[in-house]
Image: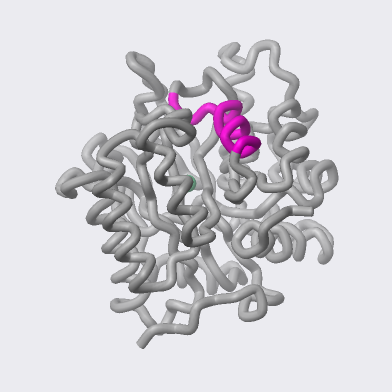
Amino acid sequence: MQPPRHTPASLAGKVIDAHGHIGIHSGFYAAGGYPYCQSVEGLYYRQRAAGVDVNVVFPFGSHPSGAFPYELDNRRLLKEVYEFCPEYAERFLPFLCLDPGGQVPEQLAAARALIQAQAVYGIKINPVDCRSPIRRLGTGAGRAVLELAVEFDLPLVIHAVPQGVDEYSTAEDILDIAAAEPRVRFCLAHALLFHLDLLDQANRLANVWVDTAAIKIQMELTQQLIRNQTLRGRRLMDLDWHDPRAGIRQLAEAYPDLIIWGTDSPAYTFITRRQQGNDQWFDFRLKGSYEAEVDALMAQDTATIRRLANTNPLNWLFHERRR
Ligand SMILES: [Zn+2]
């Protein structure tokens, strides 16, 4: 049983959570981190408890037993959504994870087969998780990932941080790539850590969106990065860093058609030691909840909720241009 492919019409009026993970992050598990997994069934019950209708979902990590990055994880995700839990399938919009930094032809051959067999709605890249500098997406073998997005008209979501926060996920590089490739729609995850120049630059590009994934702990992390000088000299939004509702409200007011709501479920909590660069590690000790992410959205007025959780995500998922 396969559900019909979703369209803007079939998603009209739905509350869409545009950023969620399904599967296992075996690296976090092995290192004693938390969380490390989520199932379709588990996320379905979170949705039901919170009043969310639909989730964009992609793998959590790349399992080491795969022959190339995300080999097992992409296959497993589609199997879980469409074969193991078909009764919930209409609530999920699966994306494939790709690593532009290695074994790209193998990854793309597998991705193409999956896309042709089942409904796939986009591509996720997490540069810090694959330890691949994102500029590889713009040149050399990595460019084939962009060509795949063009070929199947798939949007991208990319984990992004201001330059210097980690060595791989540099938002400045992603925005350069997006400016040079207007045929592809890009979503930069995690609110660009509220960096005003990057948000303004993203807002000027018609093929770029920014998500709020894990806003509660992104606000806490930003405070930490201010205190430890990582964001020294950067122009940030003026926020009450303890109030995710205000964070969402100010983002939505300043950038009404740029911002997309997402929870990062289950990574709205992030407790792990992660490699951020060649010999750069960071100890994350950040605790959030699905409720806090949903509350930050639902505290907004009706028109804002509709924009963040329906209109803007649908434009990114299905339309060619933001404006
Ligand atoms: Zn995420």
Residue 130: x percent and y percent? 34, 36
Residue 132 magenta: no
| Residue stretch rendered in magenta on the structure | 168-180
Name the quadrant of the N terminus: bottom left
Residue 160: x percent and y percent? 54, 35
Place residue 231 in its image quadrant. top right
Can residue 265 be seen? no
Q: Residue at x 47, y 23 (%)?
A: 166
Q: Residue at x 39, y 56 (%)?
A: 96
Can residue 142 be seen? yes
Residue 84: x percent and y percent? 29, 77
Left or right of 79, for residue 149: right
Left or right of 290, for residue 73: left
- Closer to us: 236 or 29: 236
Place residue 192 in its image quadrant. top right
- Closer to us: 98 or 192: 98
**Colour pattern of the rendering:** one colour
- Closer to us: 239 or 314: 314
Q: Residue at x 80, y 44 (%)?
A: 255
Residue 237: x percent and y percent? 77, 29
Residue 178 magenta: yes
Residue farthest toward the bottom in the current orientation of the protein: 1
Above or below for 195 versus 150:
above
Above or below for 67 versus 11:
above
Above or below for 319 versus 68:
below
Q: How would you classify the magenta stretch by its main secondary structure?
A: helix
